[in-house]
Amino acid sequence: MNKKIGIQGIKGSFHHLVAMDYYHKEVEVMEHLSFHELAQKLAAKESDEAVMAIENSIAGSILPNYALIDEYNLTVVGEHYTPVNMNLMALKGQEIGDIKKVFSHPMALLQCKQFFKQYPHIKLIEDVDTAEAAKRIHDEGLKKVAAVASPAAAQMYELEILAESIHTIKSNATRFLVLGTEQKKPNGEKLDKASIKFDLKSERGSLVSVLNIIRDCYLDMTKIQSLPIIDEPWKYSFFVDVTFERPEDFERAMDVLKLMTEGLRIFGIYKNNLS
Amino acid sequence: MNKKIGIQGIKGSFHHLVAMDYYHKEVEVMEHLSFHELAQKLAAKESDEAVMAIENSIAGSILPNYALIDEYNLTVVGEHYTPVNMNLMALKGQEIGDIKKVFSHPMALLQCKQFFKQYPHIKLIEDVDTAEAAKRIHDEGLKKVAAVASPAAAQMYELEILAESIHTIKSNATRFLVLGTEQKKPNGEKLDKASIKFDLKSERGSLVSVLNIIRDCYLDMTKIQSLPIIDEPWKYSFFVDVTFERPEDFERAMDVLKLMTEGLRIFGIYKNNLS
C-alpha cells in the first residue's frame, strides 16, 4: 500500500510538488485546506507523514507552524528545499490585457510584487492555495481572471501560461519540513541536522552562553529566531536549527542545554538537505 | 493642520486604534489597502508618519515589512503595543447558530482558532482587514455572515457582538512600529531602543562575537532573527532590537559592528514602550 502523505492545498500545489520530489515514488497525497488540518490528521494517523512549508527568504519562518508541531506532538523527520517558480495563468485564449483580477496565495503574490507593478489595473486577491485558484478558473470557466501558480498547476487544470517565472528574486527557495509522529530512526543515511526550541530569561549574556556551548560542541547554527513569551516579560523562546558532523556532539550539547535552558524541545533529528 | 498618519486597513481596524492611542490627539488617518501602499505613500510624503504591525507572540516578526522599510528608506521613530481583542460580530438580530461564514484578517482568525473549533460548520475566510470585513457586512446587509474585529469596528459599522474576547491567548499583544522618513530627533524624551540589521558569514563563532560586543557595551537584546541571504550560502541577515540606558553605549557598539559585520543598517532609535 502506498504511503499517505498530507499536503497543504490540492494537487498541483507547491506542497504536492515537494511530496513528489521528496519521496521519489508513488505516494498517495491527502489534500488539506489548512496547516491546522494537516497537523491534526497526521496526529490522528490518517496520514503517515506530511510536508509543511516552514520558511523562505522573504517571509522568514512561519512560526505558527512550529506551534502546530508542538501542539500535536509531531516530529521533524526531514527537510526539502524547492525553488520558487511562479507563473501567471488563465483560460486558453485570454491575454494579459484581458486580465482584471489575479488570485493566489499571499506569499506567491508577495513574491511577484515587482511584476505586477507594470499592471496597476490588475487587482491582486489573496487565496488559500495557488493550485486551488487555478482549479477554480478551470472549473468555473472564469474569464478575465488569472492565477499565480506552478507550471504543474497550469498543466493539471488546462490553463495557458501568460507569463512565466514572474517572481522577483529568481533564486529564492522555500524550505519544507517533512513531519511524522515519531523521531526518525537512522536508516543508512546520515542524520546531521536538528531543530530545537528552548526558553531563556534575558539575563545579560545568557544567550551568549548557550551559543558558546553550541560552538564548543562543533555544531553550526543555520537559524535562530527569538519569540517573546506571553505574560513573562523579558523571557524568550528561541527556535534554532543546527548542523553537525557527529551525532554525539549534538547529544553532548543537548545534555548541557537541558541544564542551562528551560523547556528544551528537540523537534527532530534529520538529514540536512541544503546542498 | 492635523498630522496625516498612514494606517493599514480602514477606520476601526487595529492600526486605526493604534494611531488614536499613540498620538493622543487629533490626527488625520490615511487608509491603505496594503502595507506596500502604506510604505509607498509615506515615502512620497503623502502622509507624515505611519503605523505598521511588525510582530506578535504567535506569528513572530512580519519580515516582509522590514523589506518595505528598507526599500522605501523609511525610519523607525517609535513603537506601540496593543493587546489583542478579537470579537465575533454580525448584523443585529443574527445569532451565532445562524452564522455560516466568518471573514477576517488571517492573523485574527489564527488567534481565534480554538474558539471556532466548537463551531465546525462555520467556514473561516481570509480577508485583507478586520474592519473592512465588518464594514462590508454592514454596507451590503449580509446575513449568516460574521466578522472578527475590534469592539470599535462593531460600533462604527453598527454590528452586534455575538461573542467577545474570542482570542485564545488572553494576554497576547501586537507590536507596531511608528514610521517616518527621517531619524527621530530627541524631543525631551529618552530614546533608549533601536532596531538594526546586519549580515554575517556563518563562520563558527561570528554571531557569538557580535553578541559579546552587544553585551560588553551594556545593550540588552530584546529580539533576534536570522534570515538566509539568497544566493549566498551560509550567509545570514540578522534583525536585532536592543535597549540601552545611555545613547553613547549604543553608538560605541555600532562603531564596532560597522567593522565586524556587513551592511549594517540602523532602522531607527526610539523610545522603548514595552512597560
Image: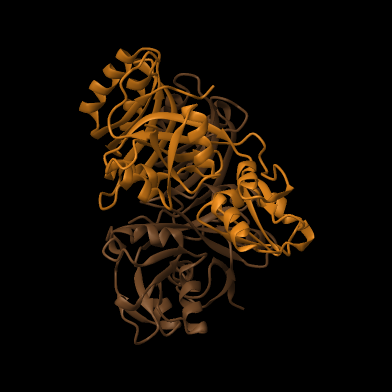
Chain colours: A orange, B brown
Q: Residue B211 at what x, y percent from top left?
A: 42, 30
Q: Residue at x 59, y 59 (%)?
A: A139
**Whether residue A205 can be seen here:** no
Q: Residue at x 52, y 52 (%)?
A: A129
Tally of numbered discs: 0
Quadrant of the frame with the N terminus of chain B: bottom right
Please tell me whether residue A141 is drawn above or below residue A192 in the rendered image: below
Q: Residue B207 at what x, y percent from top left?
A: 45, 27
Residue, far bottom:
B93
Q: In the depicted view, which residue is nearer to us: A68 or A263? A: A68
Q: In the depicted view, which residue is nearer to us: B12 or B127? A: B127
The reply, left or right, for residue B24 in relation to residue A238 is right
Tell me the quarter of the picture where residue B113 sits.
Answer: bottom left
**Whether residue B194 can be seen here:** yes
Q: Residue B99 at what x, y percent from top left?
A: 36, 75
Q: In the depicted view, which residue is nearer to us: A113 or A215? A: A113
Quadrant of the frame with the C terminus of chain B: bottom left
Please tell me whether residue A125 is drawn above or below residue A220 in the rendered image: below
Tell me the quarter of the picture where residue A260 sits.
Answer: top left
Residue, far left:
A259
Please tell me whether residue A272 is drawn above or below residue B143 in the rendered image: above
Q: Residue A158 at what x, y percent from top left?
A: 66, 50
Please tell me whether residue B102 is drawn above or below residue A111 in the rendered image: below
Tell me the quarter of the picture where residue A204 sits.
Answer: top left
